[in-house]
Image (cartoon, grey):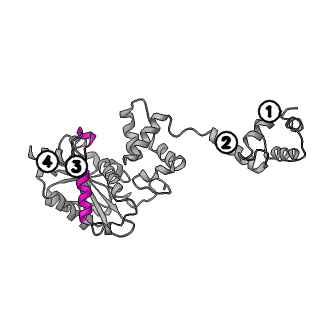
Amino acid sequence: MVSESHHLTISEREQISILLAKGMSKRAIGHTLGRSHTTINRELENNTPPINKGYYLPHKAQERARQRLTQAHKRPRLKNKTIKDYVVSKLKLGWSPEQIEGRLPIDYPSQHISYEAIYQYIYEDEPGLIKYLPRSHRKRYPRGHSHRHCRSHIPERTPLDERPIDVERRDTIGHWEGDTMVSRKSKVALQVLIERKTMFAQLTKLDRKTAVEMTNAVIFRLGGLPAEARQTITLDNGSENTEHLGITKVLGTKTYFCAPFHSWEKGSVENMAGLVRRFFPKKTDFALITDEQIESVELLLNNRPRKSLNYATPMEVLSGAITG
């Protein structure tokens, strides 16, 4: 009588191994187990070693069958080639999975993907793409695994949702985003500022990632610009930003803050940090980078044509806006 169970058990696989060793045919083994001989054929074809098909081990066969069953029931994380190509290309441009999730339906209205699916695709299917993530952690940490900034410690903090709509639309110049890149080799950091409309970047070396260093660097870099070119700054909730009122007092700017754990809300500077990492990779010790090297990278980035600027450069657009 043929068994009604669809999948072979480990016990049946052990019997197959014993009966094969006795020289029984596949048809005879099937008859002994109450299985169709085609089931035995398929088992030996699928679950024996790929090089030596005559070498059948029941525990190895059980593991291969289990893995194949798991894969068969796993939904593809990226639904089709269009999404996969889009995700990979944008990751290589330095976009975060959250940015890709938000932008995909704009570029392809019929397509949707969650940032969680993108993270799973990277860490479980394509670990070679980890290096393109903003943080490039080899191991993925649970979202919000650190709770240091759940409660705001920044005085007179204005949330991002109160930022004027014209800043969001990039209608005018003078609206900046700031971030700080750190080095695991030393306490020296790199401050990154970017103007949202023109994509003009400013890079400044900090001896330490402190509020005083951050504040002084922002005042120094933006202080030479006319007032209309330095109106607002968007920052995250890092402790280096606690002295933002000092910037406001000197420059007359207004500062806005992302929601906790939503640094992707200042996507322009996050993207710029990814571009800077191409010159100064993750393990770079910023203490060994000279001011001349940083200035050279800043110059290259500001004189690179940008598609969002109709292939003008950030330097050209900002200069034109100020002198015009």
The type of residue carrying mark 3 is Asn
- Which comes before the other along the chain, label 2 or label 3? 2
Does 139 lie within the magenta span?
Answer: no
Q: Nearer the viewer, mark 4 or mark 3?
A: 3
Cα distance in 3D space between marks 1 and 2? 18 Å
Name the residue at 29% across, 67% down.
210
- Which comes before the other along the chain, label 1 or label 2? 1
Element class at badge 4: helix
Q: Which residues are magenta?
A: 291-310
Task: Give x and y (percent) for residue 37.
Answer: 83, 33
Residue labelled with disc 1: 38
| Magenta stretch, overall SS | helix
Task: Give x and y (percent) for residue 255.
Answer: 22, 54
The type of residue carrying mark 1 is Thr
Question: Which disc number belongs to residue 68?
Answer: 2
Cα distance in 3D space between marks 1 and 4? 76 Å
Question: Which disc number belongs to residue 319?
Answer: 4
Q: Mark 2 Cα within 10 Å, few/some/many (few <14, many 20+)?
A: few
- Where, quadrant-wise, is the N terminus in this rendering? top right
- Where, quadrant-wise, is the C terminus in this rendering? top left
- Which comes before the other along the chain, label 4 or label 3? 3
Name the residue at 11% across, 52% down.
227
Question: Which disc number belongs to residue 303?
Answer: 3
